[in-house]
Image: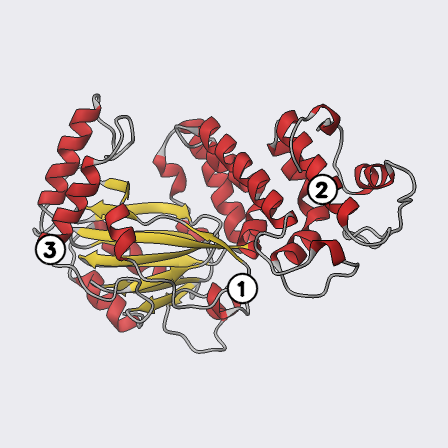
Amino acid sequence: MTSLREVCKALKTSTSGHAQLFADLLANDGKNGPLKVNQRSKARERFGTDPLNLPQVGGKISPFPSPLSIAKLQETLLKDLSTQKEGNVVFFPPQEFPVEDIAKATDLINNIDDANYRWSGLIPSLASPTLDSMRKDCKEIFTNILGETQTTVSVLPQNTFLKLQHFNESFTYSTVLTGTMTSIIWPPTKHNLDILQYAYAHLAETNSLNSLDVTEDLEGGVAFVQYPGDTVRCPPFGLMTAFAQQATVIAKYSVITADSFLMALRHLPFLETWWKTEIDESQKRSTFALAVCDIITQILDGDFDTLDLEKLQYPLEKDSALLCLLNAWDEINNDVRRLLNDQAAGRLKQKWRAFLRGCQGNTCMLCGQKFKRSKGDGEKEHFETHHWAGEGGDEDAMDVDV
C-alpha cells in the first residue's frame, strides 16, 4: 500500500489521465515519493520530528474494526441521507432544487457496488451519525485533546479526481469503506502552504479550478494506496490530492488537540484566503470565530486540564492545553483580534483579565512581569499594553459571566 511498487501497480489499473498525473508527480526530480521510506529520508524530515505528523496507513488504526457489507453500507448511507435538513449540500455540483440533490445522491449510493459506475458529481461530505455510533475510540495517544468531530462520509464515482486541498486544524482519520483510493499528502511547510494560499487567492479571483494545478511546485509529498479497511492518519494542514480508481466510499473524523488548534490560529491569514473561495465564506468565518472564543475560554477555565487555576504561578511548567495557549498568545493575538467582532473581542478580553486576576501573586502568567494588584485595574493596564493588539474589545460594555 505504501511502497512505490504498490502505488504504480494501482495506477496501472486505470486508463484515466489522472493516473498519469500521479505518475508524473512521483517522477518529479525526487520532490515526492512513496510513503514507505526510511527513517532518514527528507520526506520524513519535512513532516517534522513528531511521528504523529507523518501520515500513517493501515488497518490497525481503523476506527471500524468490522467491515461493512456493501448492502449494509448502502442501507447506512441512505438512512443518514434521509435525515439531512433541506438546504444542506449533499451533492456536488449542487442542483437547482434540493430534491434533485437528494435524487442524485440516492442514485450514487445505490450504485457503489458497481466499480465501473460513472456520474458527473459526488457526495463531498455527508454527516453520518450511524457510522459515528459504530466508530471505536481513537487507538493512538494524543496529548491535550480538545475534542473530536462527528463522522462524515464522501462518496466518489470511479475516476473522481480530488484537486489540491488542505486538511483542517486537526488530525484526520480517513477510512476507505469500499473502493480504491490513491493519494499524495504534502507536509504543511511554509513553502507548500504559501503556494496553496496563492492558488486559493487566484481561485477566488477567477473562479477557475485550474488555479489549483500547482502540485508540481510542491515538495515532500508521500504517495500511498488505500483499499477497503485501510485508514490514513493525516496531519493538520497537510496538503492532499487524491484519485478514486473505483467507486469509493470514505469515512472521516478528526481529533483536535491544543497544539493543532493553535496551529490554526497561526495560519489565520491562510484560512482567510481559503474562506474567500467558499460559497459560505461569511458563515465559515463567523463559525470559526465563535469556536476560537469558545475554545480559548474553555482553556482559560481549565476545562481540558487537571490544573488548580487558583494556585497557578509563573512559570507554568506542566504540559497542558493552558501552557500551549500561554506560550502562543503573544504570537497569535493580533490575528485573533482581527478575526473577532467587537462584542466577541470584549468577551475574550474580559476572560483573559479574569484569568490573570484569579492567578496567585502579582506576576503575569503570560510574560512573568509584575503588575500592581493593589490597583483595581493593574492587570487590565498590563494586559492591554503588552498582550492585546490594537484598539477594540470594550469589555466594560459586556454583560457576561466569567
- In the visual, does 64 lie left or right of 257? left
Residue on which the image places disc 3: 70
Nearest the viewer among 183 and 150 is 150
Relative to 196, does residue 377 appear above or below in the rendering?
Answer: above
Say which residue appears at 74% left-offset and 54% top-offset.
Answer: 310
Say which residue appears at 29% left-offset and 58% top-offset.
Answer: 135
- In the visual, does 349 lie left or right of 217? right
Residue on which the image places disc 2: 352
Tag 1, which secondary structure? Answer: loop
Residue 352 occupies quadrant:
top right
> In front of the other: label 2 or label 3?
2
Residue 15 image offset from top left, x and y in percent: 15, 54
Tag 2, which secondary structure? Answer: helix
Q: Residues within 10 Å of mark 3 (few under 14, many from 20)?
A: some
The answer for how far apart the CA atoms under marks 1 and 2 are is: 24 Å
Residue 220 image offset from top left, x and y in percent: 46, 62
Amino acid at dot 3: Ile
